[in-house]
Image (tube, helix red, strand yellow):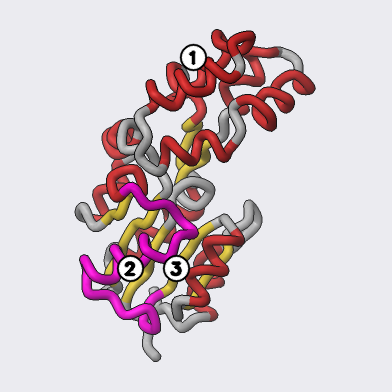
Amino acid sequence: MEIKNIIFDFGGVLVDWNPRYFFKDYFNDDEKMEYFLEHIAQSEWNEEQDRGRLLSEGTDIQVKKFPEWEKELRAYYDNWTIMLKSDIPENVEVLRRLENTDYHLFGLTNWSEETFPYALENYDFFQIFDGKIVVSGTEKLIKPDPKIWHVLMDRYDINASESVFIDDNPKNIEMAHSLGFSTIKVNPDTNLEQELAILGVKF
């Protein structure tokens, strides 16, 4: 089936977000930083904020659990913008080239509703999606829950078999594939243009 829709995840695909960009200097001790990110401010905790929990509520919950880490936990979302280091230029370039084609472009992202407006405001390429972005924090659903793909498909009348889904998370790729999407798993060395061309996307 011919590809008509191209759906982008954002973190790790179009933008480079990593809490280490802030905490490396904050701790100045890689071992302590990795302990904190693995056991205290772990990704499962951050995902609940992506699912729609308020940043303040998520922070308070974790501070109650780990009062000795209160200062570091409160620093997490206070310095979130430092963690959003930059765009990923080679992939953004592919997106900009797709803007001038007939393909329909969409975003499907796990992102807190409170922090996403900052990204929208500071990275102009988000305008290419023309508002056709499904944000987990707004929907109170998070990938890889299949329901969030159904929100996207129903809202924009998308047929999975005519669509490519691009993400850096293997679980999300697996789920999208099971729903009938063509998929591209992005790694730091992925040539996105080449991968899209293999699927028949023409620039």
Q: Amino acid at mark 1?
A: Arg
Give the image quarter of residue 128.
bottom left
Q: Which mark is residue 165?
A: 3
Label 2 with label 1: CB-CB less than 8 Å = no
Alpha-carbon span between mark 3 and mark 1? 34 Å
Q: Residues within 10 Å of mark 3 (few under 14, many from 20)?
A: many
Spot the residue most to the front: 64
Image quarter of the N terminus:
bottom left
Closer to us: 160 or 118: 160
Indicate which disc residue 150 carries: 2
Give me the residue at 21% from left, 52% from top. 131
Q: Residue at x 50, y 35 (%)?
A: 46
Q: Compared with residue 112, is residue 171 higher up or lower down, i.e. above or below?
A: below
The residue closer to the viewer here, 72 or 11, is 72
Magenta segment range?
A: 140-163
Residue 74's disc number: 1
Question: First in sequence: mark 2 or mark 1?
Answer: 1
